Amino acid sequence: MSVSAWSIPSDLEDETTTPGRRELMNTVVKLEPKDVESIPFQEASLDIWAKKYRLTAKDGTPIDQTMDDTYKRVARALADVEREEVREHWYERFLWALRRGAIPAGRIISNAGAREHKPATSTINCTVSGTIHDSMDDILQKVHEAGLTLKAGCGIGYEFSTLRPRGAYVSGAGAYTSGPLSFMDIYDKMCFTVSSAGGRRGAQMGTFDVGHPDVMEFIRAKRENGRLRQFNLSLLITDEFMQAVRENREWKLAFPISLKEMEAERIDLNDPAKVIWREWPVQDGYVVNEEGLVACKVYRTLPARRMWDVIMTSTYDFAEPGFILIDRVNEMNNNWWCENIRATNPCGEQPLPPYGSCLLGSVNLTRFVRNPFTEFAEFDWDEYREVVRVFTRMLDNVVEINGLPLAPQRDEILRKRRHGMGFLGLGSTFALLGMKYGSPESVKFTEDVAREMAIAGWEVALELAREKGPAPIMNEEFTVTKEMLRKRPEMARDGWKPGDRVPGRILHAKYSRYMQRLAEVAPRLVEQLAEIGARFTHHTSIAPTGTISLSLANNASNGIEPTFAHHYFRNVIREGRKTKEKVDVFSFELLAYRELVNPKAMPGSKNPGEQLPECFTTADDITPREHVDIQAAAQKWVDSSISKTANVPTDYKYEDFKDIYLYAHEKGLKGCTTFRFNPEAFQGVLVKEEDLKNTKYVFTLEDGTEIEVRGDEEIEYDGEIHTAANLYDALKEGYYGKF
């Protein structure tokens, strides 16, 4: 039998093929079938690899001739961290893992082994700022630190609710403050200025406490054209607020009381109408009780559900703010005893302490599917576990070549050695295996993938601790406090008292909520980690992987997302262009299906000979609850967090949308974001052709004449060809000609 792989016999290609025979088409097997490794890379994937990840000399001459050369460069750089006598062994193992689906994050791919050509860059994707204290000196100092961080190619996250609300009196200046949002504008302009010089663009996350007096201004900030466009914005949502929403109670907006303020205003700390006690990231200079709670002055009270409605309508229309369940984050943090997390990396999958770093990598799940699109389709669990094991060692080695620009950043990563391994291509893998995204079997598969990654990773954490030593924090001793006993009452039951000294490895392995969960499936492993300590404090995160997926994974689906669409456009920033460029892309599973089964297959085709199987779902086919179910299944075994966006169609009903965050809270998530294409608000990164065709944009010419064009139409303007949608967005947002 000599036909192209998974080809369809001519007698099955008739347009009148019956449903039963069409099903047969999908199971026709060649004697020597190809697998997913044979799928050629599409032009868009190779183009992005060449522009973003390929190493070139100063004069533009390529040093990496092929994608495999890029893998060799990275494998060599990470193997050189090892002892000399084992470097070649680990070089071969690292190269094997990279070829088998291990994909380090973009900064590692771009900068590992590139020091000769890019000496001032980092292998770390993102960081979190030091806590911004409520003083002009510290605000501007953190701007300086952020500029240096962005210059090194790292994104950065900040919390801004540590700053006094608009209108609060500043005694030193004898004036009233303009509030946190005005200072965010400074950071926004700084980021754009630094990135305009050729660095990473828009890589900032701004978080804000849902109980801050200026929270409404934060929620509405991006409704102004061109404001805070270098930021992703997320609210820090507390359990207290969620309970107030569910019970339809009042919600107090408050800010910490300084010692000077209490004395000057003679505030009664026992008056619950004027003072409430809350967790707060800064305690110096504020009124604090013995359990570590900070006294906060009540500025305003309003119905919790009114604020909830404002949040949900904003996410529906503007896709922001994101939703970070901050109490859940801190409750489940492996470093619960020494970190108060208030910010995340720009995409939200890494909640981090001050000066924490986001060291990421993803495993491409599509590479482990055998016999795709057939009744014999299966997942190679053994090879998957081995890739995870080797990849864990690789990411740990990245710590040694971090290249972070600030001393506190370097100290933080070396002390804890946290990294975040995740996976990508989950949605594509479902299609290859014949599963529908959101189905019960897909939810179970997701949990299995996350659990097996966790177990394999922590086994390596123990092996590396024995070989190279645990993370330094594991051998440090910490003093037991009343606050610690409040957060972990089981410590008191175990006999720990205030003032006792306890090693970090015990607090990590025995009293971390996540490690307690891991102990349910691997009890002996966790016992040994408590005795010896782990090589790192955190192992897993799931990143959005947009560019990585499109390039190095041939457009396998992002992270744990469903496939956005099987044919769509991606808006890409190109140096020298005045607007974003529209790039034509196809999903990996569509490429695979055309290569292995039916070369005539077309998404949305009504022709029986061109139709795709039911397992070819897209974001438009998935309900918000199904998004959350998949995320919850992964979150159970992910010790950090997950970047997940619930995409819904433009015409999705608000009534069906508005409860997604309540459901996310019920399912134990740490965070969630949503996206609904709204052409009146913004132009997205991923755009479907039908959305552009159905959207009209109005341009006003210099003589006052107005012209109306479809979003997908091309316009010649200022010597370049632009899509109408990209040109409109660039002019409206003020970034035209500034790339």
Image (spheres, rainbow, N blue to C red):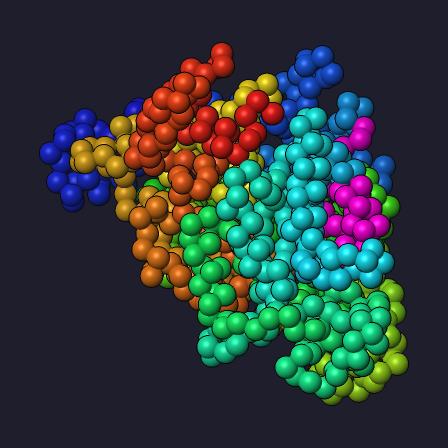
Numbered label tally: 0
Query: Is-magenta flag for residue 729?
Result: no
For the point 19% across and 36% down, the residue is 606
Q: Where 496 sits versus 131, above or below? A: below
Residue 467 vs residue 431: left or right?
right
| Region in magenta | 119-146
Residue 231 x %, y %? 61, 44
Residue 628 x %, y %? 45, 60
Residue 686 vs residue 408: left or right?
left
Q: Where 290 sits versus 231, above or below? A: below
Residue 593 vs residue 409: left or right?
left
Is residue 513 in view?
A: no
For the point 52% across and 39% down, the residue is 225
Q: Nearer the viewer, residue 631 or 40?
A: 631
For the point 49% across and 43% down, the residue is 558
Residue 172 vs residue 37: left or right?
right
Residue 350 x %, y %? 64, 53
Residue 599 x %, y %? 30, 27
Q: Nearer the viewer, residue 558 or 453?
A: 558
Is residue 675 in view?
A: yes
The quarter of the image holding the N terminus is top left
